[in-house]
């Protein structure tokens, strides 16, 4: 039986056999429909994480590699969100002193994200971006994360933009 199996495999091999599955990749080696951005993560502080959009933004930023610190009034919910997202939670009583100490101690880039109603503001001290995101806006979390990435890497992108951005086709 082993001889028959080997003979059949050898014939299959000589004929060329069935083509094996090969994933389709773009010339850059990524799958079609991917859009990748290389960036340098920095420290992010979110003052009021209790706003409607902020828990998802915290999860996305922490998942992307940013060092996220946030504060919210509900300490129990804040601790749960910190465990789930990998971000750092500061109770409101510690928040003001710790935030000023963190900003003085860090020499690198630092973003502050705040939300007021439908407006989300992202600031790095010298520049700010204000986003108007009505309730139920599609991809609102991705918009905030993308703007944070662009603002955090503003100087690096303006120096050599095409070195840091890698774009593939986006399928909608």
Image: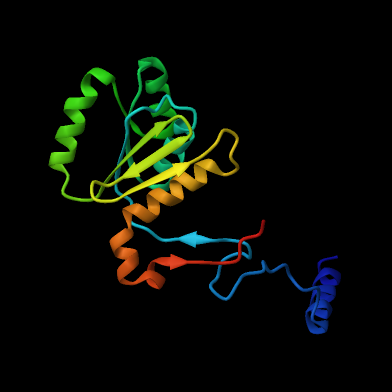
In the image, what residue occupies the spot 43% across and 33% down?
85
Quarter residue 165 falls in:
bottom left
Quarter residue 94 falls in:
top left
Q: Where is residue 5 in the image (x, y as percent from the top left)?
A: 83, 69
Q: Position of residue 14 (x, y in %)?
A: 80, 84
Quarter residue 134 falls in:
top right
Work out which quarter of the rendered image holds the N terminus and state it: bottom right
- Frontmost residue, 124 versus 23: 124
Question: In this picture, is 113 found above or below 80?
Answer: below
The tally of labels here is 0
In the image, what residue occupies the spot 84% across and 80% down?
11
Question: In this picture, is 60 found above or below 55?
Answer: below
In the image, what residue occupies the spot 80% across and 76% down?
17
Q: Position of residue 4 (x, y in %)?
A: 86, 71
Q: Position of residue 133 (x, y in %)?
A: 51, 39
22 left or right, relative to 163: right
In the image, what residue occupies the spot 57% across and 76% down?
27
- Frontmost residue, 94 versus 22: 94
33 left or right, relative to 49: right
Work out which quarter of the rendered image holds the C terminus and state it: bottom right
Q: Which residue lies furthest to the bottom in this view?
A: 14
- Frontmost residue, 68 versus 16: 68
Question: In this picture, is 63 found above or below 56?
Answer: below
- What colouring style does the render use? rainbow
């Amino acid at each position: 039986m082993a001889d028959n199996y080997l003979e059949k495999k050898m014939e299959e091999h000589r004929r060329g056999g069935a083509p094996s599955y090969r994933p389709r990749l773009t010339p850059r080696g990524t799958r079609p429909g991917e859009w990748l951005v290389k960036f340098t993560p920095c420290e992010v502080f979110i003052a009021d994480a209790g706003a409607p959009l902020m828990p998802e933004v915290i999860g996305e930023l922490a998942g992307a590699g940013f060092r996220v610190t946030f504060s919210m009034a509900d300490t129990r919910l804040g601790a749960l969100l910190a465990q789930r997202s990998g971000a750092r939670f500061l109770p409101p009583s510690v928040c003001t002193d710790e935030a000023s100490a963190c900003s003085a101690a860090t020499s690198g880039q630092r973003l502050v994200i705040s939300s007021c109603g439908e407006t989300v503001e992202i600031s790095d001290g010298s520049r700010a971006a204000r986003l108007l995101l009505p309730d139920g806006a599609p991809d609102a979390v991705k918009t905030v994360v993308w703007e944070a990435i662009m603002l955090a890497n503003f100087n690096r992108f303006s120096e050599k933009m095409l070195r840091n951005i890698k774009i593939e086709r986006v399928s909608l």
